[in-house]
Amino acid sequence: MPAERTQSDQFRGARIHLSDLSGLEIRDCDITGLKIVDCYGGDVSLSGGFERVVVNDVDVTAYVEAELDRLHPHRVLAREATSAAEYRAAWDAIEKQWEETLDRARRLPEAKLHEQVDGEWSFVETQRHLLMASDAWIGNAVLEEDAPYHPLGLPAGGMPAEASAKLGFTLDATPTLEEVLAPRLARMATMRRVVDELTEAELDRVCGRKPADPYPDKEYVVRRCLTVVCKEEAEHHRYAVRDLTVLEAGARTE
């Protein structure tokens, strides 16, 4: 079984030379300054939030971002919203794309919705994560609800198990899609009410809470929280439809 390293700094500043790294997977890591020089191989995949990516001395950052925006225009609305009207427009688009994608997902057998494609979250796990994100940034930070977190929420992999338990998440739960969608759609409706009632003054209000205890101590204003939710929705929708295409192809051949 391949070795696994978690929450480790043993590779910081390391130099790996003349080694077989085929099949290496780096997930949820800070790779600032990573260099891959004079290496060879096929089927290399990069995914994440990169400020600058250079391939064979060519900066491809702007090209990749432009292509993603062309293929997924809703991510532009999510990223660039600054006014109350723009946040409403972004959420309109997000609601519409998820309505269409959920209809598409429901046409697959339930078991397919729990399959992971290339080690990524399953469709159900994606819905659980987006539930958690909205609970954190809207329910807890913006609205300061007494009990903002639903147990079926799924935090990012970097959150320590103790912190997840403290927030009441049941990480080992295996809910059906519809069981997850009950709280997930309810929270989306909450976001709908927030953006519908949004004013320009409210956007700059400092939230009385941070999204969750693991987040660093800093001031969070409403506009920052709304932007995080919109970007999470847009980016995870991109991942979800990518993997749905694979699942649909698999279902047709079974």
Image (spheres, helix red, strand yellow):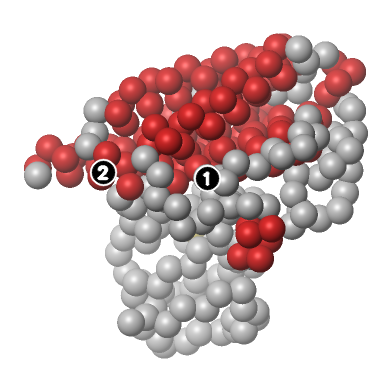
Q: Is residue 32 left or right of residue 113?
A: right
Q: Is residue 221 above or below residue 186?
A: below
Callout 1 crowding tier (Cα within 10 Å): few <14, some 14–19, many ≥20: many
Q: Residue at x 88, y 49 (%)?
A: 218
User: Viewed as shown, does residue 94 lie left or right of 216?
Assistant: left
Q: Observer-nearest residue: 227 or 59?
A: 227
Indicate which disc residue 152 carries: 1
Q: Name the residue carrying label 2.
A: 112
Question: Which image quadrant for residue 205?
Answer: top right
Q: Indicate the quadrant containing the C terminus: top left, top right, bottom left or bottom right.
A: top left
Cα separation between marks 2 and 1 = 19 Å
At x 68% / y 26%, what residue is drawn? 80
Q: Quadrant of residue 86?
A: top right
- Looking at the rendered structure, the kind of residue marked 1 is Leu
**Residue in the image at 68% along x and 16% along y:** 193
Type of amino acid under label 2:
Lys
Q: Position of residue 17 (x, y in %)?
A: 47, 87
> Measured from the top left, where is residue 26 in percent x and y?
49, 67
